[in-house]
């Protein structure tokens, strides 16, 4: 009986100790961990920059994956739209899709490079998409360009070149 009482007392002590240890872990250790984490971050603030850069990299990668998924989804329709004007080899192994605005200075500068690309590589096809974002004149030029490409596809490139080289 004496041994049994000792065993029960030991079990009670162990149980109470486990409860106390659990309470310490739940209530006191997080407070002390917050203190040590804060102290560590204040001592090494570059850690915060590393975390921010890591988060930005992950966000950029996700954005890029999302954009690639969208391009995969709509890419064929952009490349192979029979109603969209193009220059170069109709069966070219490389298709470049150009979104442009007739008023865009950079689009015009790029147009001279496009001609050079087409002349130097007969495996390239360049598809043109009007993107009139620079005002009413852009919209008017885009509408005229689209109408001409539908009514007289063979004259589209002359009209397009004339507007881009103005």
Image: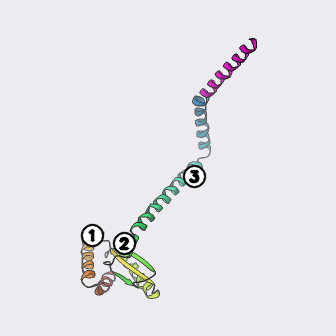
**Front residue of this view, candidates 91 and 166:** 91
- SS at badge 3: helix
Q: Position of residue 122 (x, y in %)?
A: 45, 87
How many marks do you count on the picture?
3
* Above/below status of 139 relative to 53: below
Q: Is residue 137 visible?
A: yes
- Give the magenta range: 1-23
Q: Residues within 10 Å of mark 1 (few under 14, many from 20)?
A: few
Q: Position of residue 65 (x, y in %)?
A: 47, 61
Q: CA distance from mark 1 to mark 2?
A: 27 Å
Residue plotted at (43% across, 67% down): 72
- Quarter of the image holding residue 74? bottom left
Q: Nearer the viewer, mark 3 or mark 2?
A: 2
Q: Which residue is mark 1?
A: 135
Q: Position of residue 136 (x, y in %)?
A: 24, 71
Q: Which residue is mark 2?
A: 77
Q: CA distance from mark 3 to mark 2?
A: 41 Å
């Amino acid at each position: 009986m004496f041994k049994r009482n000792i065993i029960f007392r030991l079990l009670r002590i162990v149980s109470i100790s486990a409860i106390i240890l659990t309470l310490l872990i739940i209530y006191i250790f997080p407070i002390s961990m917050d203190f040590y984490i804060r102290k560590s971050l204040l001592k090494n603030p570059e850690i915060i920059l590393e975390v921010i850069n890591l988060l930005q990299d992950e966000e950029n990668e996700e954005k890029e994956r999302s954009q690639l998924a969208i391009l995969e989804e709509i890419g064929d329709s952009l490349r192979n739209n029979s109603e969209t004007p193009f220059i170069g080899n109709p069966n070219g192994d490389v298709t470049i899709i150009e979104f442009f605005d007739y008023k865009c200075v950079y689009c015009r500068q790029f147009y001279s490079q496009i001609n050079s690309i087409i002349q130097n590589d007969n495996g390239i096809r360049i598809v043109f998409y009007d993107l009139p974002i620079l005002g009413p004149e852009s919209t008017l030029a885009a509408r005229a360009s689209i109408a001409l490409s539908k009514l007289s596809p063979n004259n589209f490139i002359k009209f397009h070149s004339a507007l881009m080289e103005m």
